[in-house]
Amino acid sequence: MPIRQKASLTFNDTGTHTLTLTVIDNDGEQATAEQTVVVEAPPPGLMAAFRATPTEGEAPLTVTLDASDSAPQSAISQYEWNTTDGQITSGRTGETFTFTDPGKYLITLTITGKDGTVKNTQKTVLVKAKPVARFIAIPNVVKLSSPEVQLDASDSFDPDGTVVDYRWTTSDAQKASGKITSLFFKTEGQYEIELVVTDDAGLKSINIARQTITVVPEEAQLHPVAIIDVDDKEAILQRTVKFSAKRSRDIDGKIVQYDWTSSDNQKASGEDISLTFAENGDYTITLTVTDDDGLTAQEDSTISVGERVIVEFQGLKPFYEVGETLKVDLIEDVQVKSRFDRVDLWVGIQIPNGNVLFKTPLPLKPFDIAAKPFKASLETLNVAHRLLEFEVIPGLGGEYILYALYVREGETPFGEGGYQAVQRSNLARQSTILANFANFGLHQAELEALEASDLVEDVIVKANGEFSFKFEGITHYGKLGQITQGMPPSNGGLNIQLIDDANDDGIPDLEFTYSNGDKQIYYYLGFYE
């Protein structure tokens, strides 16, 4: 048996273990010694966990965050939070996010350990939208001999669910329920009908829909009611649309004539007609009905024919100060002939350094430098959704240009022929400028005040703080907080920089200094020294 003075053992189980060493000399004498070894479980790894309260509700919804469940707390050095709509914060407990628009949002917690380890976890927040109540009342003027008013709330809708309940009330204390119903008014006068709807989440409509019904004397002559129903099944392929006036009515007689006109100067007559349009686009159709007393009524309806592939931005302002919230929506409208004409949607943002970031469908990585479409294989779509929402913070300054374009399915707008070769829609382009520091507008005004005071000429101030002006015939360039291209003031030259609050108005001031030996100029917010 080999003699070893050193040995190693591996313990796979936690607990207390006793080691016994026995040594034997060459005379056969032996001795033993014991040592106790305690094996403990390894410390737990970094774990990110948090509670968000509440996780659903109606807008505006404020969610309180608590990362106390992250462990071990003694090993965590930083807690950072962000949302898919661009909100950010930091801290372990008590932080909040407020969601002002309906939709689903992801909240991400990222924790950093003292050893540099990073872990994250997510929760979903659902901001529910209230339904919208809408209805038509036919007719809205009746006689005592025919007091029935038909009510139709089919146009009511819920943006993120289904309308499940319809409640009707009138100013004469009548009540009814259901999407389609009737009410009767048996006394001359005016009556108000109100509708409140409830969705499948239990939320009542954001509005109360109202209409007024008038009951007139029996001898009164009533105008007819014109109603247009549209069948646009062939509007895309053949640009043909069918129209019906069958639901038009005359309470005290009958309709004897139906006349139709369109915004492209087509004319037709009859209760049911069909019109074919030469070009893709939107058209307004007008129906005029005439009753047996010679009284008339009109109704307009707008229809779209042919392929429709449109994209646009809404809500973007030309300029944002630090502290303002930037919100921009993307409006998508796609209607193509068939699955063989599908399109892909590309959305990009050119940032101040010239790079372009592309919108992705991934909540955790909404933009990427890799050129890929935002949505693919679109055939029918009509939706508006929030593209960006975030508070402008210092350091983001400069011009941002947003682009959106539909191209042929599977194609790229960066091919040899450029985007025009594969373009299937308008090219939406909109730009904005973000200030790079707080109180930009005020400081810009201060610099421009220098020009008004005849100290300098031709003042130009950019959003990122870069400026130029002409002083004693020489054009100088610089950036707020930095020395201009002139010499430092101590040796003679120019300087414009943010300084402490010189006039105690709570806002950091701009200091303009010029020195060339004998001449010294100091300019602060609104006064000289």
Image (cartoon, rainbow, N blue to C red):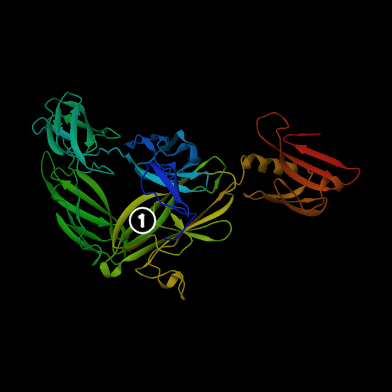
Q: Which residue is mark 1?
A: 332
Report the residue at 29% width, 67% height from top.
Answer: 278
450 lies above or below 216 = below
- Residue 221 appears in the figure: yes
- Residue 326 appears in the figure: no
Where is residue 449 shown, x and y percent of the image? 72, 41
Q: Residue furthest front?
A: 27
* Nearest to the observer: residue 480 or residue 143: 480
Where is residue 112 shown, x and y percent of the image? 49, 45
Mark 1 Cα shell of 10 Å, populated few (<14), some (14-19), many (≥20): some
Considering the image in quadrants, where does the C terminus appear? top right
* Nearest to the observer: residue 43 or residue 417: 43
Where, by quadrant of the figure, is residue 131 drawn? top left
Report the residue at 34% width, 57% height from top.
Answer: 333
Q: Is residue 219 left or right of residue 467?
A: left
Q: Residue furthest right?
A: 518
506 lies above or below 374 = above
Where is residue 343 shown, x and y percent of the image? 34, 65
Where is residue 145 shown, x and y percent of the image? 8, 32
257 lies above or below 191 = below
Q: Amino acid at mark 1?
A: Glu
Q: Residue furthest top?
A: 173
Q: Is residue 516 left or right of residue 498?
A: right
Q: Is residue 463 left or right of residue 271?
A: right
Where, by quadrant of the figure, is residue 260 drawn? bottom left
51 lies above or below 327 = above
Considering the image in quadrants, where does the N terminus appear? bottom left
Q: Secondary structure at mark 1?
A: strand
